[in-house]
Amino acid sequence: MGEQIKKILETAESAIALCADELALQLAEAKFLGRKSQLAELMSNLSGLSPEERKTAGMLLNEAKQTIAELVAKKRAELGLVKQKLALSRDVTLPGIRPEIGHLSPLTYINRELVDIFKELGFEVAEGPEAETESNNFDLLNIPANHPARDQWDTFWLKQVKDGNDNTLLRTHTSPVQIRFMLAHQPPIRIIAPGRAFRYEAEDATHSAVFSQIEGLMIDKEINVAHLKATVLHFVRRILGEERNIRLRPSFFPFTEPSFEVDVSCGLCEGKGCKSCSHKGWLELMGAGMVHPQVLRNVGIDPEVYSGFAFGAGIERLTMLKYGITDIRLFLNGDMRFIKQF
Ligand SMILES: [Zn+2]
């Protein structure tokens, strides 16, 4: 049997040496080490031998198997196939893959920036509930039930919930926070109230049923439109850039008199007119005005002594202007590709 094994080894050695690629090597491996190989056949014949002979022959066969296996492994290394296998295994020196964690919304960044800017100006942050009473959201802001202006605010009513005799609703703006604060504090008052508001309306690229506003309110003696304009210009320039300008256009809100729409100069054309500003040079920013004397009376502040301004800016609107975002629905759809850009 020794001779036979020696011959097999010689054949295997030259056959393996001739292998030029992976396939050839696999075939050679199967031929000399597989279940139908000559070695396997000899192995199965061992049972016919005496115990002594069986032991010697078994050892020889195993040695031969091992020699061939080593030849195959050596050839595999020569062909560069081992490298490929290594490349597929783990490299413990590589940095790990971080698990995906949450990311702040751009609205949160702008909100924090606004709070910081107004804190520098001596404003404090006031908060109120998102589910409001009809009185705080409408009546005390000089928008009684039969007032035609009420139609400007498409409202989500909370039918099952009453606050005393008052109906409840999802606040349609952050202005009720003004009412709450003025009912509890006497002037001088300087507050901002950032928060969510809700309107029952169809959503499109510029309208969302859920949106964020920041309300500003300043009440003191001899406060006038110049204070309003200076304050708004200051925060607009801090958020959108020092080159921006604002203008006030006459408008109407029941809770301010006079009322204004505030426009900001277009950042792309610097007011010259371009596609993004419909060639006007200006973009609509927010509503503002001097607090209506009736609103002051409603909360027990004497309009003969005190005056003040208020504004309500859409935080989405500011964020869209700052980053050139064209669809308000992106803020709430949870797409990480959008969120990760900020
Ligand atoms: Zn423009």
Image (spheres, helix red, strand yellow):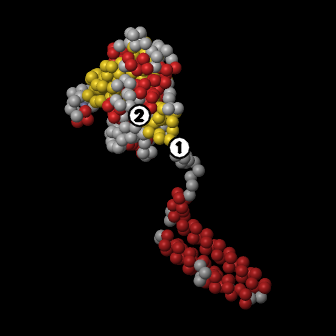
- Residue 271 seen in the current view: yes
Which of these two is toward me, 87 or 22? 87
Number of residues whose C-alpha sits closer than 10 Å to that of mark 1, classed few (under 14), some (14–19) or many (20 or more): few
The residue at the far bottom in this view is: 48
Residue at 47% from the left image edge and 71% from the top image edge: 20
Identify the residue position indicated by label 2 in the image.
Answer: 172
Say what amino acid the circle numbered 1 marks: Ile
- Disc 2: CA contacts within 10 A as few (<14), some (14-19) or many (>=20): many
- 205 shown above or below 267: below
Whether residue 326 sits left or right of residue 338 in the image: it is: left
**Residue pictured at 23% horizontal, 28% vertical:** 281
User: Which secondary structure lies at badge 1?
Assistant: loop
Q: CA distance from mark 2 to mark 1?
A: 33 Å
Mark closest to the chain's N terminus, 2 or 1: 1
The relative height of residue 127 versus residue 157 in the rendered view (above or below) is above
Front position among marks 2 and 1: 2
Residue 230, label in figure:
none
Q: Position of residue 43 (x, y in %)?
A: 67, 83
| Image mark for residue 101 | 1
Q: Position of residue 276 (x, y in %)?
A: 26, 35
Please provide percent x and percent y for residue 147. 34, 29
